[in-house]
Image (cartoon, coloured by chain):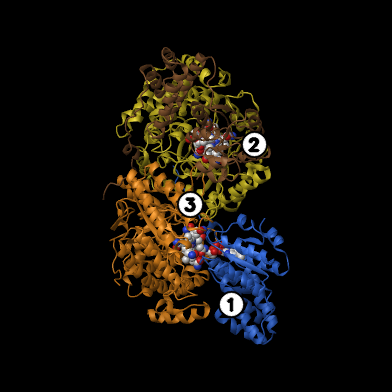
Chain colours: A brown, B orange, C yellow, D blue
């Protein structure tokens, strides 16, 4: 009798190649890019300041920070980067961005505002935190309402900040019911904002059973969805694009 | 027809999970009975999804995908997916065929990507109605055969069925605790119908290079077992179910005499007896089919299994993923434990624990434990002159084994009932023809629509 | 506070499922760690049923009833029911209390009728938000304590919690693969919060004659494990999760130093380490919690269990009955297999199979296998001068064990990540005070709302 | 270490007492009663004919057959009788009844008509068969439409036989959906008949989600439900009584 095979390490069969990253325009920008790609938050500020010697802050942002972050997203999507690498890259990118803004003396214009929250009664906010980090790294202003947020507070915040998109996270079936209530309140008050709901407990069928609701499976989806929202794509179309 | 005249194994002790005398290979690198146990998942579509072919195909696609992915994510070496037809898939042969094709393609993709071993079993629904139509010549038969064809053409690896011949008699009799009708409906009529059906299924399988899998006495012995229910139920007696199981074994054996190669169907609790006689790989289900029924042999029925199944679970959300992934996970780990035992050379120890867990939980459990299964098998082959004699011999053996083991405690009611059953079994005529005459007279009267012609009689 | 300074067991080999150095008795004839394993079912209400107290009570009544009935119908000797609070049950102390009372009454009825052994565990939700409020003095704390009271008054047998101290730091750090913050958030802050919480829980339990059960590092080590996910996931690395588990063990131990008696909470995958050190009965979950998450130690985590759980399953219909019965059945048979092994004197054989099944499936699995759990436990008690030192020692030990066993294969990424983690761990200051200063400076900046005062610092 | 207890035979702890059965008015009727209680179909006809010597057939029915069957039902409900005992008692009772009717030269009036069926596509009809037997033994006329019955046929039969109650059995979630269609057709055509649905796949929540639907958990419930239906209790009340 053969020795029974008890498990297979498919992960080892799957080893992926080395990461290859697009090159920057010059060595100074290359260093900025490298720092973001490597998530080197400790040195990013110094490197950005180095780059100012031959580049305008807007160029450092565009050709250094943003370009690097695009590479990071690609590496993640290709399965070469792990989540923590992506998050520390975002941290580095945001620190660099802040420095550029300081240099310019004004904030860079954000693509738009997104209000995020975790449902009332729910303290599982890790998904939301990841969504926050990714949205910020992708150029959005995030209004983070935190966790265990009452329905009223979400509606109030949306009236106040007029975001392009709202997100909700819920990990419990007994808390996700708040999303429908929020969507109903939006409808009643004539707010036609895409409302992306995600988190372990939440399923596509349920979110798409009420108006405005769009299901968000992975945190990575939040930035492209927000791009669409900012571009004025209506919630019905965003739902169609991501939920079928 | 070549009837089995001797046992495949020299003793019960020689039988073990994962290994058979006659292993079977098919699918993507999939081998059963060759030294390893595999899991088999059965997913069922949600109500409503069967409305159109498109929605049903989509439902199966999602279920299969999640099942295969869970197997990969946890590192399971292989998985068989059973498509247990809802009637729409058999009444529309292209539905069944196309779903089989789609499932095979999904598995091929995963095989390319990860090398995970896999196979598809198509279990065609037997929608024939013996008390209403001519089951040897009716639309439901045509459709079933056409669906076997379409499934095989679409590369389903294994063709199986849960056939229903003799059910009109056994239903009536089981509900009444009538052992004569049960022996007649299963042992005689059921076996004759198996002969009729399985000749055709094997031909279709051979024509297309599919493996003819197996059948189950679900329609009969499982009705008795299911009605007997749990410890406190007061429906069919548990000893009646136990004896019915032995009869069912004699009947299910016919598929393998007609050329089916296994693995057998999971819900055939008579399979340990079949393995003892025929030496082919068997599929069984127990604790991990709790989604489909409450089981009194949850661990024991693993003792000689080769393919471990969940019977059937309806697709819906769980806190993590859906049932389609959840049950693959549980099955996969059950199987990993068995394969670990094999790898450590301790498979007989694990088997002993499985048997110890349940053997005296219930008399039906008792008769499918390896030792008793083997004894019943021996009586079946030793009396293999005709369907009636072998089924009756198996039944008498089961009854005597239970009564003879004082550790197998019975309630007063169950004990008296078993003594009655044994008395009756022993009082039946010796000749098959006489028994058939006797039963024909009785059941033509009491079972409306009963027609001997359905069984070539 | 009396810290553990030596191991409860002389060697890993001495540890086995079903038996502990310090068995616990409570409930209706229920004993844990006294030579037998029992199942523990966790049912969760369907969305919507939490709207009113009445509908939620009715939901729990049905779930408990079916769970208990399935246990009886299959002949299981006993069952613990865990009430894992949805937040409404803790935010309204009378809801939690009344549901506990109702569950105990249902079990008492069944005990009268059938003699089935049973107990109720009430797991109060920790709704405190460390980055938003003073977790040593806030409404959510008051409510939690009031709910412990109401549950104990209503005769809940066991009081447990999944406390969240230090989570604001560990969440931030785990997602970033930052081992410093993880060690700080769990090992230092988490442990200090445990001390604060468990003193009060133990007092309440003692006052009412309930048993203080246990805690879990669900809020932290499970976040890492859960994010690490399956074999092909690319989130937190699996080695990071493994090291985090060792840190979690040092933190969870605090509950038992403060007077909790076990059984521990099922989702505490650090429990084998706890058992090695504290010698109390542990609850674990593995393959049969596939309804709640995908598990890479499905069998292995049974190796030294005393109470076998399904984590949590949402209540809904299955083809037979509901999930509340289905999961009791699977758990019950898993347990029957373990108890059979014990009865046959083959428990070490079964344990070997469980371990063989999964030990090299994943590095997180590896560190909770009995042998490694024991080694990590030894390092924890040997360095038990303060919370920081013992947690760090456990973490370093886990990393070295993984790196030192060549059978534990790692992908290139995982190997490099583990070497990095080990380097960093070794580079941290020796003194707790220095480490705290270092971390305070870093995380006050990067984690909004972080407040040392929450931890008496 | 104690020997672990692997299972408990609760059934053996539960052994119930001897059956005690109400006595008949005289020895002849007693024999009829005994034959029904014992399910002695072979001798019932002879015994009924014996009883005719001193009793009117209507008395044999009322004081022998029906009284015995009441005892059988009681024994079953008390858990002393098993299902097969009940069914063979029904068989004996029905054989005796036929003999009485022959003697009277006319059929005894039935309490009312019940139409039963198993859903389209479903050949799991065992539950229905048990329901049929119990209804018959309790004095109802059963129109048995069999299994795998199309929606149209059920509606047609109900128009034809005007039953007091209709039943449906389904063991598959993919076939039970027919019940709702049938109920809708009844509504459309103004048929207000209680429609009791049972079988393994069928759950209370689902059956009570449409009008006319009443959930039947156990076959034993069919006769008392039919009694109510014949008494003109509306479906809403029957549902209230059995489904809460
Ligand atoms: C860690 C954990 C905890 C931690 C939470 C830590 C934290 N910071 O969140 C602690 C210990 C505090 C905890 C507490 C409880 N928990 Co908990 N917990 C978990 C666990 C193990 C992992 C959850 C997790 O962090 N996942 C990782 C994150 C990253 O995943 P995620 O949030 O789903 O996010 C991903 C996607 O969903 C998506 N996403 C999320 N949001 C959004 C939004 C947008 C816009 C988009 C595009 C995408 C997106 O992106 C992320 C990554 O791609 C789960 C197990 C499980 N099966 O989920 C149970 C679980 C969620 N918990 C559960 C329960 C019951 C509880 C308690 C009630 C237990 C108790 N009695 O104490 C309490 C709840 C207290 C409360 N009021 O909330 C149940 C919920 C049952 C249910 N569905 O109703 C679960 C499922 C476990 C179980 N028992 O089966 N828990
Ligand atoms: C025996 C059986 C068969 C036999 C049927 C024999 C027969 N005469 O009915 C056979 C082999 C033919 C069979 C075939 C199939 N079966 Co089948 N079968 C079973 C099994 C094991 C037992 C069913 C049974 O007889 N129960 C005993 C009877 C007495 O119970 P009951 O009908 O529920 O009745 C009780 C109550 O519900 C109530 N009741 C019923 N009706 C009514 C009505 C009223 C008015 C009242 C008051 C009460 C009431 O009273 C009864 C007793 O008190 C179940 C397992 C299970 N978990 O249910 C699967 C099961 C029902 N079968 C199943 C399947 C899928 C099939 C097949 C499609 C398999 C295949 N691919 O071949 C085919 C179906 C073909 C078809 N078109 O119908 C699935 C159904 C899945 C689903 N829910 O959708 C089940 C659940 C098994 C599983 N896979 O999990 N099956």
Horizontally, is B75 left or right of B449 in the view? left
Query: Residue B432 appears at what percent x and percent y?
Result: 38, 79
Residues B160 and C76: in front is: B160
Horizontally, is B6 left or right of C305 in the view? left
Can residue C115 be seen in the rendering of this structure?
no
Disc 2 from disc 1: Cα separation: 72 Å
Counting the numbered discs, the total is 3
Disc 2: which chain? A
Above or below, comparing residue C432 to residue C362 in the picture: above
Can residue D98 be seen in the rendering of this structure?
yes
Mark 1 C-beta closer than 8 Å to ligand 2? no
Do discs 1 and 3 belong to a common subunit?
yes
Secondary structure beneath label 3: loop
How would you rate the neighbour count of disc 1 (Cα within 10 Å): few for under 14, some for 14-19, many for 20 or more? Answer: many
How would you rate the neighbour count of disc 3 (Cα within 10 Å): few for under 14, some for 14-19, many for 20 or more? Answer: many
Return the mark for residue A191. 2
Query: Residue B62 appears at what percent x and percent y?
Result: 45, 49
Residue at the disc numbered 3: D7
Horizontally, is B35 left or right of B65 in the view? left
Disc 1: which chain? D
Residues B430 and C435: in front is: C435
Query: Residue B403 appears at what percent x and percent y?
Result: 43, 65
Q: Quadrant of the C terminus of chain B?
A: bottom left
> Which tag is nearer the camera, tag 2 or tag 3?
2
Q: Which numbered disc flags the more N-terminal residue, 1 or 3?
A: 3
Secondary structure beneath label 1: helix
Q: Are marks 2 and 1 in contact (CB under 8 Å)?
A: no
Return the mark for residue D92. 1
């Amino acid at each position: 009798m053969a020795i029974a095979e008890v498990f297979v390490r498919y992960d080892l069969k799957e080893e992926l190649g080395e990461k290859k990253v697009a090159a920057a325009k010059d060595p100074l920008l290359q260093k900025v890019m490298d720092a973001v790609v490597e998530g080197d938050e400790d040195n990013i500020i110094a490197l950005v300041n180095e780059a100012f010697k031959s580049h305008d802050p807007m160029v450092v942002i565009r050709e250094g920070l943003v370009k690097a972050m695009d590479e990071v997203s690609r590496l993640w999507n290709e399965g070469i980067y792990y989540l923590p690498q992506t998050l520390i890259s975002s941290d580095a990118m945001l620190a660099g961005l802040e420095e550029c803004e300081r240099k310019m003396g004004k904030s860079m214009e954000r693509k738009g505002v997104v209000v995020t929250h975790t449902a009332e009664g729910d303290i599982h906010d890790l998904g939301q935190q990841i969504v926050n980090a990714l949205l910020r790294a992708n150029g959005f202003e995030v209004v983070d309402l935190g966790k265990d947020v009452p329905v009223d507070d979400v509606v109030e915040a949306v009236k106040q900040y007029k975001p392009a998109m709202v997100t909700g996270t819920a990990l419990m079936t007994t808390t996700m019911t708040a999303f429908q209530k929020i969507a109903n309140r939006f409808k009643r008050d004539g707010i036609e904002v895409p409302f992306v709901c995600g988190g372990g407990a939440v399923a596509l069928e349920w979110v798409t059973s009420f108006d405005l609701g769009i299901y968000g499976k992975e945190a990575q989806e939040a930035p492209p969805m927000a791009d669409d929202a900012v571009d004025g794509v209506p919630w019905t179309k965003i739902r169609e694009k991501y939920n079928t | 027809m070549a009837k089995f005249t001797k046992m495949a194994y020299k003793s019960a002790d020689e039988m073990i999970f994962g290994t058979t005398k006659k292993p079977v290979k098919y699918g993507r690198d999939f081998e059963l009975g060759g030294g390893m146990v595999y899991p088999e998942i059965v997913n069922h579509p949600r109500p409503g999804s069967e409305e159109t072919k498109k929605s049903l195909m989509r439902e199966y696609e999602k279920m299969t995908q999640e099942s295969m992915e869970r197997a990969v994510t946890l590192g399971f070496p292989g998985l068989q997916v059973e498509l247990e037809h809802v009637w729409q898939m058999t009444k529309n042969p292209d539905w069944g065929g196309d779903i089989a094709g789609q499932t095979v393609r999904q598995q091929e993709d995963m095989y390319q990507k990860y090398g995970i071993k896999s196979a598809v079993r198509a279990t065609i629904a037997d929608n024939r109605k013996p008390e209403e139509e001519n089951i040897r010549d009716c639309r439901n038969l045509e459709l079933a055969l056409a669906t076997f064809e379409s499934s095989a053409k679409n590369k389903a690896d294994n063709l199986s069925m849960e056939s229903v011949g003799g059910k009109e008699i056994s239903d009536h009799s089981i509900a009444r605790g009538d052992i004569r009708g049960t022996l007649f409906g299963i042992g005689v009529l059921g076996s004759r119908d198996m002969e009729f059906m399985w000749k055709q299924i094997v031909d279709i399988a051979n024509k297309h290079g599919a493996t003819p899998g197996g059948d189950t006495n679900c329609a009969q012995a499982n009705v008795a077992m299911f009605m007997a229910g749990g410890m406190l139920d007061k429906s069919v007696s548990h000893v009646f179910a136990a004896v019915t199981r032995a009869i069912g074994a004699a009947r299910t054996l016919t598929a393998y005499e007609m050329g089916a190669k296994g693995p057998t169907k999971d819900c055939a609790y008579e399979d340990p007896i079949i393995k003892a006689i025929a030496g082919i790989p068997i599929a069984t289900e127990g604790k991990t089919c709790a989604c489909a029924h409450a089981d009194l042999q949850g661990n024991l029925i693993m003792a000689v299994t080769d393919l471990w199944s969940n019977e059937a679970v309806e697709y819906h959300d769980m806190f993590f993923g859906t049932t389609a992934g959840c049950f693959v996970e549980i099955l996969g780990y059950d199987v990993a434990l068995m394969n670990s035992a094999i790898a450590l050379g301790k498979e007989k120890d694990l088997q002993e624990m499985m048997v110890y867990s349940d053997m005296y939980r219930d008399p039906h459990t008792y008769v499918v434990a390896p030792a008793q299964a083997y004894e019943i098998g021996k009586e079946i082959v030793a009396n293999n002159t005709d369907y009636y004699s072998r089924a009756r011999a198996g039944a008498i053996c089961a009854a005597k084994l239970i009564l003879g083991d004082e550790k197998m405690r019975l309630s007063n009611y169950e004990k008296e009932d078993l003594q009655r059953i044994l008395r009756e079994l022993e009082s039946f005529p010796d000749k098959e023809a006489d028994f058939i005459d006797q039963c024909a007279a009785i059941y033509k009267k009491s079972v409306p629509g009963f027609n001997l012609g359905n069984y070539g009689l």
